[in-house]
Amino acid sequence: MINQILQSAKLALFTTSIILSGCLAVDSGKGPEAAGALVGEAWKANKAKDFELAIAHAKKCIKHNEVDAMEMQGAMTNPVPTSRENLNKEAIIEKWALNHVGASYFIMGRAYAELGKKEEALQAYQHLVATFPFAHCWDPKGYFWKPALVAKKRIKELESKPNN
């Protein structure tokens, strides 16, 4: 009976430590789950027009995952091939840091543009294009898109606008 109680206590302690370590990883912003959660929150804030919060989430993702993203980008000579017919999901998901950090720069550019901060928006978009050109974002419609390609269009649009 005592052995069963001790085994149950050990299992409960082990389970609690796993849960807490997962929570700490998400809270720290580092790693695939935490980065994904931060980008998800940044997209939600952006959609809700809480652009400062979107920028804060994006910056946290970048702070904790940019080194990994740069390593992933640096190891590639071509983007992961993808199309509507062949998503190549596993290969893209392996590049989690590249994708989440790329998305974060895109979200920041978009949020800064909405706040009327043209220079900050341009910096975010230009950094994305120059540093993370192979990043992908998932569209809930069922396909991946490349934020750097869209950022190039946004750069042209912003550069054609007069300064406020």
Image (cartoon, rainbow, N blue to C red):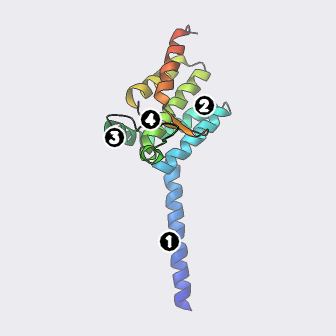
Q: Which residue is mark 1?
A: 14
Give the side of residue 55 with respect to residue 67, left or right: right
Residue located 50% across and 45% down the image: 35
Q: CA distance from mark 2 to mark 1?
A: 39 Å
Q: From mark 1 to mark 3, how far is it between C-alphas?
A: 33 Å
Q: Earlier in the sequence, mark 3 or mark 4?
A: 3
The amino acid at mark 3 is Glu
**Separation of residues labelled 2 and 4 (CA atoms):** 23 Å
> For the residue carrying disc 4, how many other residues have a C-alpha within 10 Å: few (<14), some (14-19), or many (20+)?
many
Whether residue 30 is situated above or below residue 19 in the rendered picture: above
Q: Are marks 2 and 4 in contact (CB under 8 Å)?
A: no
> At numbered mark 2, what does the secondary structure look like: helix, strand or loop?
helix
The numbered mark at residue 52 is: 2
Q: Which residue is mark 3?
A: 71
Indicate the amino acid at tag 1.
Phe
Residue 135: assigned label: 4
Which numbered disc, 1 or 3, marks the residue closer to the eye? 3
- Mark 1 Cα shell of 10 Å, populated few (<14), some (14-19), many (≥20): few
Camera-nearest residue between 137 and 78: 78
